[in-house]
C-alpha cells in the first residue's frame, strides 16, 4: 500500500455522454407546447363509496373521458387518482412503496350547486369542492382554499392506443413522429402503446416556499423554473454532477413540501417514470394572495397524487411516514465513522489501515471495499490473490467490534461457467429487451445482464445469494453497499437501461425506472435479514433511491468533487433528502476526486460529522487519505472531529429513534423548529440536529468569522464550547478557527453525550454519560435519551429498550422512565451534569432516589462568569429514577 496516485482511469468509459434536457423529451414538449385542454366534471356521474367519491371528466374537443377518485384518509391526507375511463389495458400503478393502503373516510355531499359540488368528511374541518367547468378541485380548511388541482387547466392524460403499424427501429413505418418511436442520439425508444404521459398542476395558496423533490445539486428552497429547466426526477449516473442544476441525478423522491407560517403541507406524486416538476412563485396581485404553482409531468402511469394537510411539520411528517414508512432504526455502529477508498487494496492493506486507526488513536467502525475486491467484477466473489482469507479478515475486525462493507453492483457478468450467472439466466431473473431476449449491456464487469428486481421471485433469488453457504467468504458481520443501481449501463441511453426494456409483469422499464435501486436495496436488506434469521438489523447503503427508501437503509450524495463548492452544496442536498423523509444520508468526506487541500479536508470532516451518514471515500486517482497521512495538525483536527462525533452518538441515536417512531427528520431546516419566522425559511447553511443543536458549518476558505443567525426572539443559544449565551432574534459575527465549528445548544433542551469516544461504538456504549442542560429564560429544560442493544430487533419485538426523559423545573432535574415498561437493563450511568445559564451559585446540590429517602449531597463547581454549574462524580443509573435538586 503506497501513498502514490494510481494512473488516471475514467469512472465511465471514454466518450462524452449527454443527458436529456426537457426540450429533448417528446412527452414534455407535447404537454408544454400542445393544446390547452379544458376538462369538465360530469357531476351527474358522482358516486359516493367506501373509498370516498368518484366521478367522470370529459374533454369535449378530443372526446377523452377520465375517471377521478377522491379519497380523504383518516390522517388528514387526501388522495386523488385519475385514470382513463376505459383503457385498452391497465396502466401502471406503483406497487411496494406505500406500506399499506390508506384508510379512507366516508364522504358526504355538503352542498350542491349547478356548477359545483362540495364534499366533506369526518368533523367537517376539511372539504373538497369540485367545479364543473373548467374542472378543478379545491381542498379547503374551513372556508380557506389550501390547494387547487387543475387551477391552470394543465391536466393531461394521454390515452393508450393500438399502433396502426408495428413500429421499427429504423422508423420505416412513417408514423407520427415521437408517438411510437423516439430517438436520442443513436438510441431508439419504441413505444408499443404510443404516448401515455400524464400531468397536472396544483396551486398552493398562500405558500411562497417549497422544498424537497430530491435529488438535485441545488438550493434547499426550490427555484422558480419559469425561465429555467424544470426539476427532473430520473435516476442517472451523473459523475461529478453540475452544481445548481435541475438535472436528475442518482435518486428521486416525488415528494414536495410547502411551508408557510400557519401550515406545512406535502404533495406526494406517486409515479416512478421519467418526471419533471415546474415551480412558479407568484406574489400577491390582482386580488390573488401569494401562491405557488407546481406542475408535475410524467411519462406514463396514472395520476396518483396525495396531499398531506399537516398542518404542523410534525403532523405532516407523520402523515408521510404512515404512507411510505418510518425511518429505519439503524444499527448503532452505522452512526460511527466509515472509511472507504476505491483502490487495489489487498487484505494486508486493509489490516494495515485498521491498525493505523488504532495506532493513531482515531475511532472508527467500518472499513469499505470497492469493486476491485471481487474476482474480475463478479459480485458476490473475492479476488483470491488480493483477499486469500476474507473470512479471517472479517473475524479479525469483528474481534475488535468493527465491520466490513462490500460493494455489490447490479450487473451480472455474462459468464457461462459462473453458477450465479447460470441461475439468473436459467430461472428468468434478468431484464429482457424489447425483442424478448435477455437485455445485454456493458458496465464494470464488461458485457452483463441486469437482475429484474421488480420481480418478487428475482428479489428472493438475489436475497438467497447473501446466505453464508452461497456467498463464500462472507460472515454475519459483512454488510452491503449497492452502487450503480440507477442502473448504470455504459452502453445505454443516458447511461442507463433503455425505456423499452421489459420487466416483471410485462411492464416496460419506463414505467418504473426510478424504483430500480429501491428494489435492489430491498432485495439486499431481505438477504441480510434472512441471513440472520430476522434477528439482526441489516445495513445497506444505496446510491439510487425512491420514496420509501428511508425504511430500508442509508443513501449518500454520490461521486462529488473535492472543492469548496461541493462541500457547500452537500448541506442543502442532505437537508433536501431529509425534507423528503430520508434522514440517513450524507456526503463523502473530502470529495471523491481530486485532491482536497488541508483546510478543505478539515472543514469537510467538521461538516460531515454533523450529517447522519459519516464516511470518508476517495478515488484511486488521488493520493491516499487515511487521516494520519497528513500534517500533524491536520491529523489532530480530524481526530478531534471524529471523537466529538462519537461522544455525541447517544444524542444521534435518540434522534433516529424519534424519526423511527414519529417520522420527523433527524436534520431539520430552521423553519421546522421555528415555523413562524419567514425570514429563515430559505436558510440552508444553518440547520438543526433535532430540536436541541444548531449547526453552522464553515464552508468557505480562509474564514475567521462567521455570520450566525440566532432564531427565536425569546430563545437562548449557548455555544457548546464556551457556554457563551446569545439571545435569539438577531445575527452575530462569531469568530472561528480551523479547529472549531460553531454549534449552539438551544435553551430549554438537554443533550446526552458519552464522556469519552473509545476506539469504536462498542467501546462508546460502555461509557458513562454527561448531560448538558441548557436552561431557557424561565429556567426550564427537557430532553431524553434512548438506549437498546444497538443491533437486534428486540426493541421492537419485546420492547427491550430504555427511554429516559429528563425535565428541569424550579431547580429540580428529574430522570423518569418515558414508558410504562422497562424490560431492558442498559446499565448506563450518568457521570456528570452540566447546567448552562446558572448565574447564582447554589448553596447545595442533592440527589434523591424517587422511591424515597433523604437526599445525598454531591460536589459541584460553579463558574459565575460563564454561568455554568458542573456536577461531577455521579453514579446515577438510567435504569433507576432520580432527582437532582439545586438548592
Image (spheres, rainbow, N blue to C red):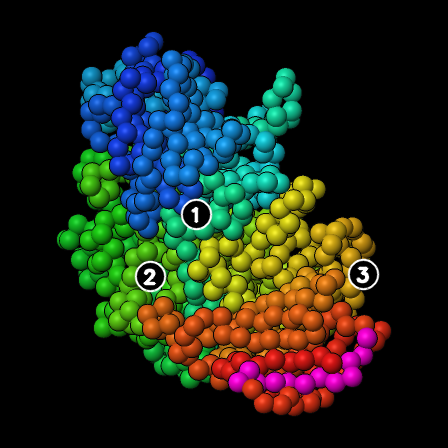
Give the CA separation, mark 1 to mark 3.
41 Å
Left or right position of 19 against 779: left
- The image position of residue 582, as x and y in percent, is 47, 53
Q: Within the magenta stretch, is there residue 526?
A: no
* Mark earlier in primary sequence (2, 3): 2
Give the CA separation, mark 1 to mark 2.
25 Å
Q: Residue at x 62, y 90 (%)?
A: 854
**Magenta residue span:** 840-851
Give the CA separation, mark 2 to mark 3.
45 Å
In this rendered view, identify the residue nearer to me: 765 or 277: 765
Left or right position of 485 against 85: right
Q: Which mark is residue 735?
A: 3
Residue 853 in view of the camera: yes
> Helix, strand, or loop for circle 2?
helix
> What residue is pinned by disc 2?
525
In this rendered view, identify the residue nearer to me: 453 or 166: 453
Q: Which mark is residue 319?
A: 1
Amino acid at each position: 500500500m503506497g501513498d502514490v496516485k494510481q494512473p488516471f482511469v475514467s469512472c465511465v468509459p471514454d466518450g462524452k455522454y449527454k443527458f436529456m434536457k426537457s426540450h429533448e423529451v417528446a412527452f414534455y414538449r407535447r404537454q408544454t407546447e400542445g393544446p390547452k385542454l379544458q376538462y369538465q366534471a360530469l357531476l351527474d356521474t358522482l358516486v359516493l363509496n367506501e373509498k370516498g367519491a368518484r366521478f367522470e371528466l370529459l374533454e369535449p374537443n378530443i372526446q377523452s373521458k377520465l375517471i377521478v377518485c377522491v379519497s380523504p384518509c383518516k390522517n388528514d391526507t387526501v388522495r386523488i387518482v385519475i385514470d382513463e375511463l376505459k383503457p385498452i389495458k391497465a396502466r401502471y400503478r406503483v406497487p411496494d412503496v406505500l406500506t399499506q393502503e390508506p384508510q379512507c373516510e366516508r364522504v358526504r355531499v355538503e352542498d350542491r350547486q349547478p356548477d359545483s359540488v362540495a364534499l366533506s368528511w369526518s368533523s367537517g374541518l376539511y372539504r373538497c369542492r369540485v367545479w364543473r367547468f373548467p374542472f378543478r378541485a379545491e381542498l379547503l380548511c374551513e372556508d380557506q382554499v389550501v390547494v387547487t388541482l387543475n387551477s391552470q387547466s394543465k391536466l393531461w392524460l394521454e390515452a393508450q392506443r393500438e399502433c396502426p403499424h408495428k413500429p421499427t427501429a429504423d422508423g420505416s413505418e412513417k408514423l407520427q413522429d415521437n408517438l411510437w418511436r423516439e430517438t436520442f442520439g443513436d438510441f431508439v425508444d419504441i413505444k408499443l402503446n404510443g404516448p401515455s404521459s400524464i400531468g397536472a398542476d396544483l396551486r398552493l395558496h398562500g405558500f411562497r416556499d417549497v422544498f424537497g423533490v430530491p435529488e438535485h445539486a441545488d438550493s434547499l428552497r426550490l427555484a422558480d423554473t419559469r425561465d429555467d429547466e424544470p426539476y427532473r426526477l430520473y435516476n442517472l449516473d451523473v459523475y461529478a454532477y453540475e452544481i445548481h442544476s435541475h438535472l436528475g441525478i442518482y435518486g428521486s423522491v416525488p415528494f414536495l413540501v410547502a411551508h408557510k407560517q400557519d401550515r406545512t403541507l406535502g404533495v406526494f406524486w406517486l409515479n416512478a417514470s421519467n418526471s419533471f416538476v415546474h415551480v412558479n412563485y407568484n406574489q400577491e396581485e390582482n386580488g390573488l394572495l401569494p401562491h405557488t404553482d407546481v406542475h408535475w409531468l410524467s411519462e406514463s402511469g396514472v395520476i396518483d397524487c396525495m396531499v398531506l394537510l399537516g398542518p404542523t411539520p410534525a403532523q405532516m411528517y407523520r402523515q408521510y411516514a404512515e404512507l411510505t414508512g418510518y425511518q429505519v432504526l439503524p444499527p448503532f455502529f452505522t452512526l460511527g465513522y466509515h472509511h472507504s477508498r476505491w483502490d487495489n487494496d489487498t487484505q494486508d492493506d486493509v489490516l494495515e489501515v485498521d491498525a493505523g486507526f488504532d495506532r493513531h488513536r482515531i475511532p472508527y467502525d467500518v472499513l469499505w471495499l470497492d469493486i476491485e475486491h471481487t474476482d474480475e467484477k463478479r459480485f458476490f466473489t473475492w479476488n483470491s490473490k488480493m483477499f486469500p482469507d476474507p473470512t479471517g479478515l472479517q473475524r479479525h475486525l469483528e474481534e475488535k467490534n468493527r465491520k466490513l462493507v462490500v460493494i455489490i453492483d447490479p450487473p451480472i457478468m455474462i459468464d457461462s461457467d459462473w453458477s450465479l450467472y447460470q441461475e439468473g439466466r436459467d430461472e428468468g431473473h434478468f431484464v429482457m429487451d424489447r425483442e424478448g431476449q435477455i437485455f445485454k449491456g456493458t458496465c464494470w464487469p464488461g458485457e452483463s445482464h441486469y437482475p429484474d428486481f421488480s420481480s418478487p421471485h428475482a428479489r428472493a433469488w438475489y436475497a438467497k445469494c447473501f446466505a453464508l453457504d452461497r456467498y463464500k467468504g462472507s460472515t454475519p458481520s459483512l454488510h452491503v453497499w449497492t452502487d450503480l443501481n440507477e442502473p448504470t449501463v455504459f452502453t445505454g441511453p443516458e447511461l442507463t437501461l433503455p425505456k423499452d426494456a421489459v420487466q416483471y409483469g410485462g411492464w416496460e422499464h419506463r414505467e418504473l425506472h426510478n424504483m430500480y435501486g429501491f428494489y435492489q436495496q430491498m432485495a439486499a436488506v431481505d438477504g441480510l435479514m434472512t441471513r440472520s434469521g430476522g434477528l439482526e438489523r441489516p445495513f445497506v447503503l444505496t446510491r439510487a433511491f425512491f420514496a420509501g427508501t428511508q425504511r430500508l437503509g442509508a443513501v449518500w450524495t454520490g461521486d462529488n468533487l473535492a472543492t469548496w463548492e461541493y462541500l457547500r452544496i452537500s448541506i442543502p442536498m442532505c437537508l433536501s433528502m431529509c425534507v423528503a423523509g430520508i434522514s440517513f444520508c450524507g456526503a463523502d468526506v473530502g470529495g471523491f476526486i481530486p485532491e482536497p487541500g488541508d483546510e478543505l479536508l478539515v472543514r469537510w470532516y467538521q461538516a460531515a460529522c454533523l450529517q447522519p451518514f459519516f464516511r470518508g471515500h476517495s478515488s484511486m486517482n488521488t493520493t491516499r487519505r487515511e487521516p494520519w497521512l497528513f500534517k500533524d495538525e491536520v491529523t489532530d483536527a480530524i481526530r478531534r472531529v471524529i471523537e466529538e462525533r462519537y461522544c455525541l452518538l447517544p444524542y444521534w441515536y435518540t434522534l433516529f429513534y424519534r424519526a423511527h417512531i414519529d417520522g420527523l427528520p433527524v436534520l431539520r431546516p430552521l423553519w421546522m423548529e421555528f415555523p413562524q419566522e419567514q425570514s429563515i425559511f430559505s436558510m440552508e447553511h444553518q440547520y438543526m440536529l433535532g430540536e436541541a443543536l444548531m449547526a453552522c458549518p464553515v464552508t468557505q476558505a480562509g474564514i475567521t468569522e462567521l455570520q450566525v443567525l440566532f432564531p427565536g426572539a425569546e430563545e437562548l443559544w449557548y455555544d457548546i464550547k464556551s457556554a457563551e449565551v446569545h439571545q435569539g432574534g438577531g445575527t452575530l459575527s462569531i469568530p472561528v478557527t480551523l479547529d472549531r465549528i460553531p454549534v449552539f445548544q438551544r435553551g430549554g433542551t438537554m443533550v446526552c453525550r458519552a464522556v469519552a469516544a473509545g476506539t469504536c461504538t462498542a467501546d462508546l456504549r460502555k461509557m458513562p454519560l454527561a448531560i448538558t442542560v441548557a436552561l431557557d429564560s424561565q429556567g426550564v429544560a427537557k430532553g431524553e435519551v434512548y438506549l437498546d442493544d444497538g443491533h437486534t430487533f428486540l426493541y421492537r419485538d419485546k420492547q427491550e429498550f430504555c427511554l429516559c426523559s429528563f425535565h428541569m423545573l424550579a431547580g429540580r432535574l428529574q430522570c423518569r422512565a418515558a414508558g410504562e415498561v422497562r424490560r431492558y437493563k442498559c446499565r448506563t450511568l450518568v457521570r456528570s451534569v452540566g447546567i448552562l445559564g446558572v448565574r447564582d451559585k447554589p448553596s447545595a446540590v442533592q440527589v434523591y432516589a424517587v422511591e424515597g429517602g433523604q437526599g445525598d449531597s454531591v460536589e459541584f463547581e460553579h463558574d459565575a462568569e460563564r454561568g455554568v454549574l458542573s456536577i461531577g462524580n455521579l453514579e446515577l443509573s438510567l435504569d433507576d429514577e432520580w432527582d437532582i435538586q439545586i438548592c
